[in-house]
Image: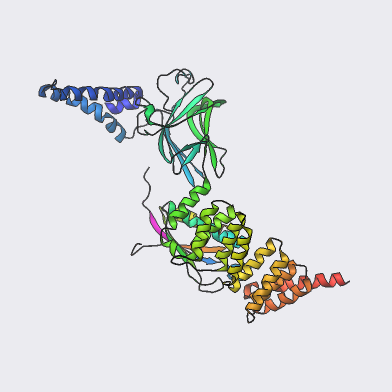
Amino acid sequence: MHVLVHQQHPSLLDALYILQATHKHLFNALIRLGMLNLRWRIALTPVFFIFLFGNLIAQSLSFPRPSPKAMVSQRVGISDITIDYHRPATKGRTIWGDLVSYEAERPWRAGANENTTIAFTHDVRIEGQDLTKGTYGLFMIPGQENWTIIFSKDNTAWGSYSYDPQQDALRVEVQPSTAPFRESLQYEFTNATDTSVMVQLHWAKLKVGFEVSLDLHEIVFERFRNELKGQAVFDWRNWDQAAGYCAYNNVNLEEGLEWANRSISGGMGATPTLTNHFTKSQILEKMGRMDEAQAVLEAGFGYATMRELHRYGRYLIKKGRTKDAVAVFERNRARYPNDDFLTFAGLARGYEADGQLQKAAEYYEKAVENAPPNTRSFYVQKAQKLRNTNTKKKH
Amino acid sequence: MQTAPPQTFIYVLKLKPPFQNPESWDEATQKIATDHWQYFIDLKAKNQLVLAGRTAYPVDDKRIFGIAIIYASTQAIAEQIMHNDPAIVNHLMEAELHPFSIAVPL
């Protein structure tokens, strides 16, 4: 019977919930006071059973419901927002100010049937106000001009009958706007960026929404901190990657500096390299500690491998510091005089960037001899092109 | 709706030939490698990654390869995870996916 009631007259089931919530306590109180004898208890048991378990019976069977269930989810950066709701239809009714009253005693459930819920996998900001990650019951107080959006810690209620303002985690005020007609209520996400999105409720000829934003970097750091407690702790590269993220994005520099230090020394797996000294110097530079940055970089050269020096030289070219780049490539050649490829290629790139084309061609030709076979043609073409440019200049 | 139970897959990563040359590694390449590492951290946080790592050889050593052991409910989803790896998206590496069975878990 309850299934039929649920399917065809959801408002009756709503009524049962009110009875369940109110009468259950009354009956319990009567029992405690000894005012209901055994005969009455036996007689009333089926009534309790229906009140208490009617919903479970109804929900364990999947019948079509007049307000079908829906779920929408949106990823913002690396965080997920999920809204679970039911979609009532207008069915020719006036919705705003009538079916959904502007003067109701309780907030509106922002959907139909069970509580509409909104879940955040990370801490967020709603219209600029902090809200801790979790699943919240979503309620709304509609108005002609302003709406109040309520995020309630109670996310398991039926509708808003048991709404308790004490459970509010956050309330924000927003303004509705007119919109093209939509028969069934729908939640949608608009204006999504890497760090924010608008959550919009759209039903009949009205839209109302709120902005959800989050600190993407903070989420990334939380994950780094977590990972750097596990096995990743034993490899200097992981500490360096985390520090490099801070340097690259110019954020969380204090902690980034700690990570860079940890990569260089002071723990299992720490290994001093030019790479992690370079990362540390970048962080110090971003902090405005230029002299320290230079000293750290100089110290790093003491540990540099041929590949690291080469990569640093190329970094300098990219930054337009071509004279410094040439100096680094020359230093690399001097340190590894028996190398027959990488140091030649580095000098070629350095001289080319610095406009010393004749010398660049010469070193590209030296590099060709021992270049990996599948990349040899690149150096041949480079040398030829530079020689041709030189010839044209002479003419 | 019932979701399929998670299965385990492994994808084996190899540097594309141009990047087996250390001379090809510049700042942009390094950035892709960092994004690739961050991607694994992201997967781990979502319980989609068992472990990831690589052989400790330099890039021009032919023995170099990397692996990622992942959880996915279907092969198609596992393929999607692999193809979304920044190292694959940005053509730094190529990869091959295999169904995988863990004998002794971490």
Q: Quarter holding the N terminus of chain B?
A: top left
Q: Position of residue A153 (x, y in %)?
A: 38, 34
The answer to whether residue A1 shows anywhere in this view is yes
User: Quadrant of residue B7 in the image?
Assistant: bottom left
User: Quadrant of residue B104 in the image?
Assistant: bottom left
Question: Which segment did they paint magenta?
Answer: B1-12
Q: Is residue A257 above or below residue A21?
A: below
Q: Which residue lies furthest to the bottom in this view?
A: A338
Asked whether residue B4 is drawn in magenta, I would say yes
Could you say which is closer to the camera, residue A202 or residue A239? Answer: A239
Task: Name the residue at 76% across, 75% down.
Answer: A359
Q: Is residue A173 above or below residue A385?
A: above
Could you say which is closer to the camera, residue A358 or residue B21? Answer: A358
Q: Which residue lies furthest to the right in this view?
A: A395
Q: Position of residue A50 (x, y in %)?
A: 23, 27
Q: Which residue lies furthest to the left in this view?
A: A38
Task: Name the residue at 16% across, 24% down.
Answer: A31
Q: Position of residue A360 (x, y in %)?
A: 74, 73
